[in-house]
Image (spheres, rainbow, N blue to C red):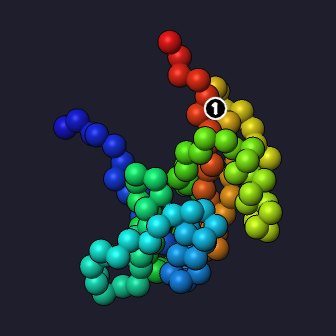
Amino acid sequence: MEPLAIHHVAINVTDVEDSVAFYTDVLGGTLREDRPDFGIAGAWINLGTQQVHLVEAPVPPNMGQHFAIRVDNLDAVVEELRSKGLEVGEPMSAGPNRQTFIQDPAGNVLELNQPGPTPA
């Protein structure tokens, strides 16, 4: 097997409508209209070239699990999200990268990651 990329991550959310609003209105994602009826509430959101699949189900306790959203300018993103009333952690270095963390309405942790220079 040769993995090409991550296609999507699926996360549990307590309220699909609230979560769709967060991932689209706050984070700039796009709601997909091609999600089949799986018999459980959910939604598919494009975030860049990958997807987040929202599943309405109990959210597990946070034990460190998260996924990261790549951004070009972390400081500008932090300022924008704070202006929308979102609690955003202070950016920090992580190797050559910079990162911070936020939570979605269901309490899922998301990392915002600005990659540093690529080593030569």
Q: Residues within 10 Å of mark 1 (few under 14, many from 20)?
A: few
Q: Is residue 87 visible?
A: no
Q: Quadrant of the N terminus?
A: top left
Residue at the farthest bottom position:
39
Q: Which residue is mark 1?
A: 97
In the picture, measured across the screen, residue 31 lies left or right of residue 95, that is left
* Residue 22 rendering spot, x and y as whole percentages: 60, 72
Q: Residue at x 75, y 44 (%)?
A: 75
Residue in front for this viewpoint, 16 or 29:
29
- Most extreme residue toward the top is 120
Q: Quadrant of residue 102?
A: bottom right
Q: Quadrant of residue 31?
A: bottom left
Residue 70 seen by the camera: yes
Residue at point 80% right, 63% down? 83
Tell me which residue sits at (80%, 47%) in the image: 90
Q: How many marks?
A: 1
Q: Give the answer, above or below, for where 51 lies relative to 76.
A: below
Residue at the left extreme, as displayed? 1
**Drawn side of residue 82 relative to residue 1, left or right:** right
Would you place residue 77 above or below residue 42 in this image?
A: above
- Residue 14 percent coordinates (x, y): 55, 81
**What x and y, as percent, mark residue 61?**
59, 67
Residue at 40% x, 51% y: name it: 49
**50 left or right of 68 in image:** left
Name the amino acid, label 1.
Asn
* SS for dot 1: strand
Q: Position of residue 68 (x, y in %)?
A: 55, 49
